[in-house]
């Protein structure tokens, strides 16, 4: 009620039981959990919450009366769901504290907000002290402004400031059971000893989109780099991350052999993580002896605007859109696609993006990401996949060149 008044728009919430299906949780971008006792969830419920987060959601916790047992169990829940990440206090430069409607620098008391992040977006947040829920419940604003403003900032962050949606609208995509794919393609998700899979929901969503719209089934498989498993059977290999990483000699040899054999590599910095992009770009560039140039693809490149014979129903990327946070960070550059490619043996064999694609493929608008909007990121990767996928089987035509109607099967006799 208070936040709606501040933002001059109607907002809504709903109470959902932990036994409800994950689809009910996905009605909102945030699941809020509070209590004064330790959380005790079954493995099934933990998996449900993990799925909610992987598909773009944010879980926010608050211990009633600053209950330490609840806070402890909430942090433990986060570590159980995402054991490769660590809780930390949000830095003062975080978009939740500096990039929303209310500036934390104006607060007399700084809320102790802990975050669990994949390096691109926050998965979970915990109000570590102060029990702001108490002041929301009692409508106590005067003297407790930060308790209200901090949560309003969290909400704005979770919907990318202006991206709130109406009930029923969703970015979630599932396979349509009545659609039968007529072709398939293998995708390699490259694994290495660092944050190789920050967005597990990204390829799940894209696979569902391609199944439903293009009748193409993606078989997305984890392939550990340097173990000799990356071969020509994979039409595309995807390498992403958020932290710096040095490829091993075996990994470099494997990537080179894969590309030499006709494979295509897509590399993106998840969330626009400069640390990953800066470390991996020169390593990719030197796979073929001297430094291989990563040239920007012009806006009229066929990947964006060219012949769509491989996907007649797929729109062209006429308007490449960036997230609001990226527009500020990139300035004038955020008007054209910044995707680059390395040409090897007269073909674009490596596509490289310093700007996020992976979080965009998840579909949820979230602030603080340097990259393309979910719609642009999804369509960009979708077009790339379709340019490499097996072509659809041509439909039979009659003597006039028109598609033949489907043959009716004779009725079965009793």
Image (cartoon, rainbow, N blue to C red):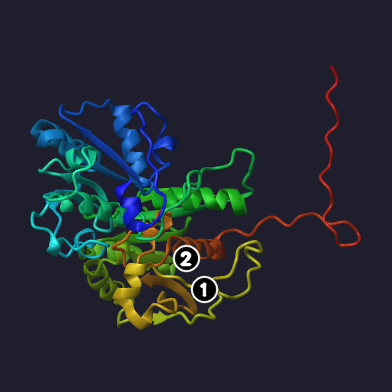
Quadrant assignment for the C terminus: top right
Q: How many marks?
A: 2
Q: Quadrant of residue 351?
A: bottom left
Lower position in the chain sequence, tag 2 or tag 1: 1
Most foreground residue, 88 or 291: 88
Task: Work out which residue is located at the far top of the displayed protein and give it.
Answer: 414
Residue 308 location (% of width, % of height): 63, 69
- Residue visible at 14% across and 49% down? 144
Residue at image mark 2:
376
219, above or below 232, in the image: above
Give how far across and how far down residue 311 sits, in percent.
Answer: 62, 63
> Is residue 180 in sight in this rendering?
yes
Direction from residue 143 to residue 176 in the image, left or right: right
Circle 2 sits in a helix, a strand or a loop, which is it? Answer: helix
Quick one: 179 or 139, which is closer to the camera?
Answer: 139
Q: CA distance from mark 2 to mark 1?
A: 8 Å
Q: Are circles 2 and 1 on residues that touch, CB within 8 Å?
A: yes
Q: Is residue 215 above or below residue 73?
A: below
Instruction: Give the image location of residue 251, x and y in percent.
Output: 28, 62
Dot 2: few (<14), some (14–19), or many (≥20) neighbours within 10 Å?
A: many
Using the image as rendered, state which of residue 245 and residue 7 is in the foreground. 7
Q: Which mark is residue 11?
A: none
Residue placed farthest to the right in the image?
A: 399
Residues 216 and 362: in front is 362
Residue visible at 39% across and 63% down in the picture? 357
The location of residue 383, given as percent across then percent down, is 53, 65
Q: Which residue is mark 1?
A: 319
Left or right placement of residue 317 versus residue 126 in this view: right
Can residue 354 be seen from the camera position used here? Answer: no
Per the image, label 1 sits on a secondary structure element best described as loop
Outermost residue toward the front? 142
């Amino acid at each position: 009620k208070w936040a709606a008044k501040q933002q001059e728009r109607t907002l809504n919430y709903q109470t959902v039981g932990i036994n409800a299906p994950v689809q009910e949780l996905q009605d909102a971008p945030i699941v809020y959990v509070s209590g004064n006792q330790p959380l005790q969830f079954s493995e099934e419920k933990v998996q449900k919450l993990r799925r909610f987060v992987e598909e773009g959601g944010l879980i926010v916790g608050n211990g009633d009366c600053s209950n330490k047992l609840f806070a402890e169990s909430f942090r433990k829940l986060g570590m159980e769901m995402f054991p490769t990440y660590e809780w930390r206090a949000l830095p003062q430069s975080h978009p939740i504290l500096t990039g929303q409607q209310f500036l934390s620098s104006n607060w007399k008391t700084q809320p102790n907000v802990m975050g669990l992040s994949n390096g691109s977006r926050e998965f979970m947040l915990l109000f570590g002290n102060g029990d702001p829920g108490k002041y929301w419940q009692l409508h106590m604003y005067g003297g407790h402004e930060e308790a209200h403003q901090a949560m309003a900032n969290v909400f704005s962050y979770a919907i990318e400031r202006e991206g709130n949606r109406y009930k029923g609208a969703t970015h979630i995509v599932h396979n349509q059971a009545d659609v039968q794919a007529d072709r398939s393609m293998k995708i390699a998700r490259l694994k290495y000893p660092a944050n190789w899979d920050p967005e597990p929901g990204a390829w799940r969503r894209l696979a569902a989109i391609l199944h439903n719209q293009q009748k193409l089934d993606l078989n997305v498989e984890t392939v550990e780099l340097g173990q000799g498993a990356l071969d020509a059977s994979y039409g595309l290999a995807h390498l992403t991350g958020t932290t710096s990483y040095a490829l091993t000699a075996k990994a470099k040899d494997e990537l080179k052999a894969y590309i030499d054999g006709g494979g295509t590599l897509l590399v993106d910095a998840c969330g626009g993580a400069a640390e990953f992009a800066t470390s991996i770009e020169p390593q990719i560039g030197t796979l073929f002896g001297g430094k291989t140039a990563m040239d920007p693809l012009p806006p009229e490149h066929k990947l964006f605007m060219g012949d769509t014979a491989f996907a007649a129903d797929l729109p062209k990327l006429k308007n490449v859109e960036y997230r609001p946070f990226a527009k500020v960070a990139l300035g004038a550059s955020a008007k054209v696609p910044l995707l680059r490619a390395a040409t090897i043996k007269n073909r674009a064999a490596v596509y490289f993006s310093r700007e996020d694609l992976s979080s965009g493929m998840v579909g949820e608008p979230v602030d603080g990401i340097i990259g393309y909007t979910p719609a642009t990121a999804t369509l960009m990767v979708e077009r790339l996949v379709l340019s490499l996928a097996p072509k659809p089987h041509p439909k039979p035509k009659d003597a006039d060149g028109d598609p033949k109607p489907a043959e009716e099967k004779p009725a079965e006799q009793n």
